[in-house]
Image: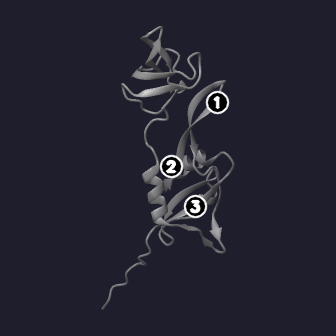
Amino acid sequence: MPVNQPDATPARWYAIQCKGGESFRAEAHLLNQGFDVFHPTLKCRKKRNKKLAWVVEPLFPYYLFIHLDQVQSNWRPIRSTRGVSRILMFGNQPAVIADELIAQLKHREDPASAAPAFTTGEEITVETGPFAGQTAIFHQQLERARNGEERAIILLQWLNRAQEVEVPLAHLLR
């Protein structure tokens, strides 16, 4: 006599639309509830308090992805989660996101810190500040400065010799 097997429907990825500017909040609350969530981000430079700084922003500002089983998972708490607007639907069905797309996004996401890691001896350009436009050689990254700003020592060709100059890390570009 055959034993009844539960439906073997695999878990799939679905898109969740978030309220404006609340995708990080929605992610945190969904994770606290035990859901498997993927929120792709990117690191970019923005002006903050008249200074360039590295910030982490959502790749898709109003969306994140959640991994659910249509039969086994409890979908009810999702709609009432802070920051969540709705589950993206096509007709009466939740929009399924291809596993391959999620895998590609995860593969391309950079887990490193927001500031780029320079290597000693690498040629860089000073983007802003009194040495803007100058080409220099990266010497070393300093540990946290007293004011919390990440800084670096660069070798700048000045007065016919290489001079060590301390600059904010955010002022440097590859």
- Looking at numbered disc 1 in the image, what kind of residue is underneath it? Lys
Report the mark closest to the observer, 1 or 3. 1
- Element at badge 1? strand
Q: Residue at x 49, y 64 (%)?
A: 68
Residue 36 image point, x, y percent: 47, 56
Disc 2 designates what residue?
32
The residue where tag 1 is placed is 47
| Structural crowding at the residue carrying mark 1, measured as other residues with C-alpha within 10 Å and reported as few (<14), some (14–19) or many (≥20) | few
Amino acid on which the number 2 mark rests in the picture: Asn
Relative to 62, is 91 above or below? below
Instruction: Name the N-terminal-most of marks 1 and 2.
Output: 2
Farthest residue in the left direction? 1
Q: Position of residue 137 (x, y in %)?
A: 42, 22
Q: Is residue 2 left or right of residue 138?
A: left
> Most extreme residue toward the bottom, as rendered?
1
Neighbour class for label 3 at 10 Å: few (<14), some, many (≥20)? many
The quarter of the image holding the N terminus is: bottom left
Residue under label 3, please give it. Answer: 15
Q: Is residue 82 above or below residue 48?
A: below
Query: Which label's residue is closer to the chain start, 1 or 3?
Result: 3
Q: CA distance from mark 1 to mark 3?
A: 30 Å
Residue 15 position, x and y percent, is 58, 61
Q: Residue at x 48, y 55 (%)?
A: 105
Of residues 164 and 93, the one nearer the viewer is 164
Image colouring: one colour
